[in-house]
Image (spheres, rainbow, N blue to C red):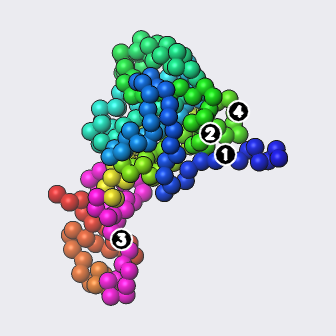
Amino acid sequence: MEEMQNVASMPLIGDKAPAFHAITTQGEINFPEDYVGKWVILFSHPADFTPVCTTEFMTFASMSDEFKALNTELVGLSIDSLYAHIAWLRKIQEIEWNGMKNVEVKFPVIEDIKMDVARKYGMVQSQSTTQAVRAVFVIDPNGIVRTILFYPASTGRNFDEIKRVVLALQKADAENIATPANWRPGQDVIVPTAGSCGTAKERMENQSEEQYCLDWFLCFRKEKK
Ligand code: BEZ
């Protein structure tokens, strides 16, 4: 029985994002239906007025226009009340850090004092029974979970990496490619592995500046101009 309590239920990559209704700092939301047609980054914080979370909120809020430009909405969650959220976001606006100041958090932050949403997404793990881990769910315009990242409470997230993941997913969907290790926009991408002996041979024999193979199963394509 004790062991069972440690099993967090959570959606997996490829699953439909679990639905919920929540009160947020920007009004009520019905998730994911309010976001159909958009990419969403749903991310959790252990609690309000915590130092690492404060730096993360400042960073994410400062990047929110960059995410909007990628048709991507941010939705935060912290295990605290709506009034605590409001007070924390007001305080964040007064703090200056790492070149950021007067940072207004315009994306919704979910009130989840009862941890209903956090539990649906496996955000409450063995680290604490009262605080969420730092989870990131990237959800596509059809409401499908496409990426899941978990960090412990002591480690602030890398928001450039989260943006890179969104860019890579969008590119993979649009161009039927994959992205290699440490890929950055503009760099060569990987074309799907040859599905027949004929295609494997043809690719190896017909290499060009635009498409080249290191071996039959590892072929790259230059960024489309
Ligand atoms: C923080 O955000 O600073 C934090 C939150 C929970 C535990 C430890 C640190």
Decide which of tag 2 and tag 1 comes sooner along the chain. 1
Decide which of tag 3 and tag 1 comes sooner along the chain. 1
- Quadrant in the picture for residue 112: top right
Give the number of the mark in front: 4 or 3. 4
- Which residue is drawn at the image coordinates 36% and 78% (left, top)? 194
Where are the magenta residues, as a range? 174-200
Q: Are marks 4 and 1 in contact (CB under 8 Å)?
A: no
Which residue was labeled with disc 2?
119
Decide which of tag 3 and tag 2 comes sooner along the chain. 2
Residue 192: mark: 3
**Direction from residue 23 to residue 199 in the image, left or right:** left
- As measured in the structure, the alpha-carbon distance from the residue carrying label 4 to the one carrying label 2 is 10 Å
Crowdedness near tag 1: few (<14), some (14–19) or many (≥20) residues, C-alpha within 10 Å: some
Residue type at tag 3: Pro
Instruction: Give SS at disc 4.
Output: loop
Task: From the top left corner, tell me how far across and down residue 89 is, in percent.
Answer: 45, 18
Query: Who is closer to the viewer here, 103 or 40?
Result: 40
Q: How many marks?
A: 4
- As measured in the structure, the alpha-carbon distance from the residue carrying label 2 to the one carrying label 1 is 7 Å
Residue 8: mark: 1
Task: From the top left corner, tell me how far across and down residue 41 is, in percent.
Answer: 43, 40
Give the number of the mark in front: 3 or 1. 1
